[in-house]
Amino acid sequence: MLELLRGIGEEVVGSGKDGCIYIDDAVRRMEALSEEAPGSVSLIYMDPPYGTGKRFEVRQKVGAREWKSGRGSLVLPAYDDKLPRDEYLSMMRSVLTSSKKLLSSDGLLFIHVDYRMHAHVRLLADEIFGESSFLNEIVWAYETGGRSKKVFARKHDIILLYASSEDYDLHTDDVAEVPEGGRRNHMARRVDEDGRTYRQIVSGGKLYRYYDDEPVPPSDVWSDISHLQQRDPQRSGFDTQKPYRLLDRIVRCASREGDTVLDPFFGSATTLEAAFAAGRKFIGIDINPLCAVLAERRLKDAQYRLFCPEGEGAPELDALAAPGITDTGVYLNAFEPCDDELKQAAPSGYDGIDNWAAGRLENGVFLAEGREIRSKNTPELTGEVRVPLPGGGLVVRVSDILGRRFFYRLQN
Ligand SMILES: C[S@@+](CC[C@H](N)C(=O)[O-])C[C@H]1O[C@@H](n2cnc3c(N)ncnc32)[C@H](O)[C@@H]1O
């Protein structure tokens, strides 16, 4: 049994150079960030609650067996989307006001909503950003789900696009794609001397030629990105997860390598993963600590800072460190859940662990030097990580499957 440590709210993975994750209220954290670093963010994408009146869930996988089968059995609350409209709009007013301060002069803001709050949020954002800063209403159309007979089936979301100023930097060419089935079908199809098919049109005395194999930037209707299917391999278990391709498109056309991309409601961390993969820095905020666990899994190769309050309760941990010639092995021997909820969900102690790390404390910050994270490719925890020598002063951090983090000082 090791000493449980309290008051560690920050963890750094590697140098922390790739981004920051905050488990916090978006209103509070956005306000703080906009005071600390105004004008420092190039792209903000937000996918807030939509005012659905529903409760959303996360399906967690418990233990190696469920990771192997790909099916999670533990259903946990993701978020309650039940704010009364005035409270919802007051939250959005605050987050949008901070967004305006945080964006650089060439920055862009994407607000993802649906038919419920779209009109309200549009008016609010017009007021805060100015009507002339409104660039697009993107319709993301998809075909998943059933068909209602009482109304026309609702098969699209709205993504509002605003610019920070006239100097905004949107490069739609970077996300141009060759359209399926060619382009401009109403024009006569011709074949040139090299065998390439094209359409052409004369307008204002000028001849325009469009080749079928040439990439075209998207219009404001995005129907080429499907919603996640039931058994989609991308699924993280988070109810309102958005497809990676959607965020990849937004990140690549609205920011450049090295820029900072921020998502104040990051959920399952789709934006953070897309930003990291495209060489952008990321900032993610979410109020639910479980989202940190999802983000860590999707950002396994990233170096970042994570700010997350530790969990309540005191599970028992047994671990030891064995210094070797080139590094130190840290071995996790036992983990005893501190409450019935976890005991019921994961009767075998190890199954209650989502991921764990060993490292050192520096000025109250935990430096994670060795980590094990369960994922599809690594369903089992070996219970061993390697950290650099020397072996003294080590701390172990365990995150359980409920998203709670606990820190322990290793006494040998
Ligand atoms: C629609 S989901 C985001 C889904 C995300 N785009 C994805 O791909 O997984 C909305 C998120 O907002 C978070 N949230 C709700 N209220 C919040 C608040 N006041 N501060 C921070 N996050 C909040 C919820 O926990 C939830 O994860």
Image (spheres, rainbow, N blue to C red):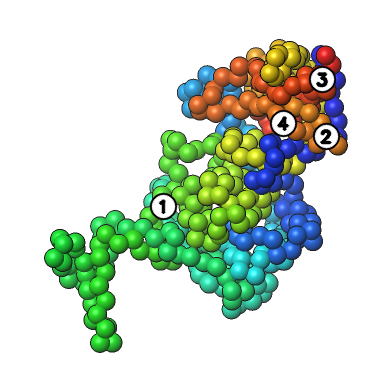
Q: Nearer the viewer, mark 3 or mark 1?
A: 3
Q: Is residue 94 visible?
A: no
Mark 3–mark 1 contact, CB under 8 Å? Answer: no
Viewer-nearest residue: 239 or 39: 39
Locate residue 263 relative to residue 235 in the image: left or right.
right
Q: Mark 3 points at which residue?
A: 392
Mark 4–mark 1 contact, CB under 8 Å? Answer: no
Of callouts 3 and 1, which one flags the residue occurring earlier in the amino acid sequence? 1
- Amino acid at pointer 4: Ala
Of callouts 3 and 4, which one flags the residue occurring earlier in the amino acid sequence? 4
In the image, residue 107 lies at what x, y percent?
61, 66
Mark 3 and mark 2: Cα distance apart in space: 13 Å
Q: Name the residue under label 4.
A: 368
Residue 225, disc:
1
* Callout 4 secondary element: strand
- Amino acid at pointer 1: Ile
**Residue drawn at (72%, 31%) of the image:** 368
Q: In this view, does 289 lie above or below 165?
A: above
Q: Quadrant of residue 93?
A: bottom right
Q: Is residue 87 above or below residue 292?
A: below
Q: Can residue 251 be seen in this view?
A: yes
Q: In this view, does 148 lie above or below 125?
A: above
Residue 362, disc:
2
* Callout 2 secondary element: strand
Locate residue 228 relative to residue 291 in the image: left or right.
left
* Callout 1 secondary element: loop
Mark 3–mark 2 contact, CB under 8 Å? Answer: no
In the image, residue 221 lies at what x, y percent?
41, 63
Mark 3 and mark 1: Cα distance apart in space: 51 Å
Q: Quadrant of residue 128?
A: bottom right
Report crowding for label 3: few under 14, some 14 to 19, many 20 or more residues within 10 A (C-alpha). Answer: some
